[in-house]
Amino acid sequence: MYITFEKLPEEARVWVYQAERALSDSEQDVVLETGKQFIDQWVTHGQPLIASIQVRANYFVIIAVDDTQLPSGCSIDASVDFMRNLTNNLSLDFFDRTNIPLQIEGKVKLVPLVDLKNQIRNGAVSEETLVYNTLVNKKSELNNWLLSLRESWLARYFPQTQEK
């Protein structure tokens, strides 16, 4: 059963899907409309899931479900199938995790991981550069999902933070 994102509890489980490029307004409308339709029929063991969907920063599709009744494996598979259908319908890839979403001058900039390593070596990107943490699991974590590279899993690519 679809509800607005704001009405979900802070402990709601979230999945973040990153588009390969910014979504247009009409693409965002498609995501939200088809997402609401999907959520209205989304069930676990025959029981409706209380969930929501939103688009953030024109790149991120976030599906969230009330943590009082978590989806089963089959229900999670259904949500992945929904995203695969969006991938096909919009001719966009939501499953490529090799592009790192940085915030540069207030905007999302996707940087291939290989290029990020080069930019770090060249000094074009610093430990203070912000990255969107698409690995968040709870709605409450979205409040602070922008991390410095130093605070993220990418810290290992900075020479001074590598383990010896």
Image: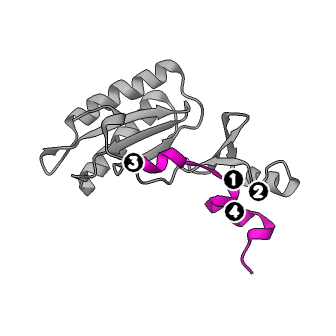
- In the picture as drawn, the residue positioned furthest to the bottom comes out as 164
The CA distance from mark 3 to mark 4 is 24 Å
Q: For the image shown, how many numbered marks are present on the structure?
A: 4
- Left or right, 40 with reference to 115: left
Between disc 2 and disc 4, the foreground one is 4
Q: Amino acid at mark 2?
A: Lys
Residue 56 pos. (x, y %):
51, 34
Q: Do residues under tags 3 and 4 come within 8 Å of each other at their CB atoms?
A: no
Magenta span: helix, strand or loop, mainly? helix
Any mark on residue 117, and which? 2
Q: In the image, what residue occupies the spot 27% across and 57% down?
A: 73
Q: CA distance from mark 2 to mark 3?
A: 28 Å
Q: Which mark is residue 155?
A: 4
Label 3 sits on residue? 14
> Magenta segment, which residues?
139-164
> Helix, strand or loop at disc 1?
helix
Q: Earlier in the sequence, mark 2 or mark 3?
A: 3
Mark 3: which secondary structure? Answer: strand
- Residue denoted by label 1: 113
Q: Are marks 2 and 1 in contact (CB under 8 Å)?
A: yes
What's the residue type where badge 1 is placed?
A: Leu
Element type at mark 2:
helix
3D distance between C-alphas at marks 3 and 1: 24 Å
Residue kind at label 4, given as amino acid type: Ala
